[in-house]
Amino acid sequence: MSNTVEPLVWDKRYAIGVDRIDREHESLFANYNVFVQSTQNAGDATAVKFGIDLLTNYAANHFANEESVMRAANFPELRTHIVEHERFLDELSRMKNAFSAGEPVYDAVCTFYRTWLTNHITINDRKLGAFVYGLGG
Ligand SMILES: [Fe+2]
Ligand SMILES: [Fe+2]
């Protein structure tokens, strides 16, 4: 097992202040930990592919929910935010295909998911919380 597959631990640093979104982000962390636990390494190809699908599907569902919250709030950076979400899903899809083709991308999947998610939440999603609070005074 590589060093890249450490658990993702939720704490208040990742809170953006919009309850529904924060709960979904916690689930995105939990899903990752289940994925890592259930695969451990790239040895079980079926489990890895199934796990990547689950990670992708939950993320896609979360993105749709988050975008609808942004739309309802008239969040000004919605368009660029949607592009960020699409890039994440495209990259996971590309990695899954690479894995299916026998490329050793398991560690890269873990690293990409962790890094993208923590950066995206703390930099991009946080702007939504700041915007909503700004509107609410
Ligand atoms: Fe987002
Ligand atoms: Fe998000």
Image: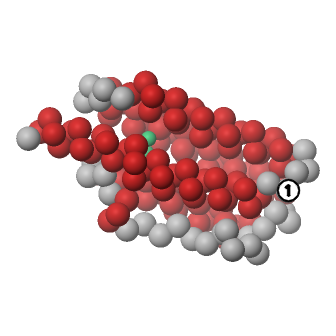
User: Looking at the picture, how far across and down is residue 98, in whole percent?
Assistant: 83, 44
| Quarter occupied by the N terminus | bottom right
**Could you tell me which secondary element the residue under label 1 belongs to?**
loop
Callout 1 crowding tier (Cα within 10 Å): few <14, some 14–19, many ≥20 = few
Position of 25 with respect to 88 (left or right) is left
Give the amino acid at mark 1: Pro
Question: Residue tagged by mark 1?
Answer: 104
User: Looking at the picture, how far across and down is residue 128, in whole percent?
Assistant: 30, 40
Snapshot quadrant of residue 90: top right
Position of 110 with respect to 15 (left or right) is right
Snapshot quadrant of residue 10: bottom left
Can you say whether 134 is above or below 112 in the image?
above
> What sort of colour scheme is used for the picture?
secondary structure
Q: Answer yes or no: is residue 20 visible.
A: no
User: Looking at the picture, how far across and down is residue 65, in whole percent?
Assistant: 41, 36
> Residue at image x 52%, y 29%?
83
> Residue at image x 8%, y 41%?
137
Can you say whether 11 is above or below 135 in the image?
below
Q: 1 or 61, which lies in front? A: 1
Q: 23 or 126, which lies in front? A: 126
> Residue at image x 52%, y 35%?
84
Position of 46 with respect to 73 (left or right) is right
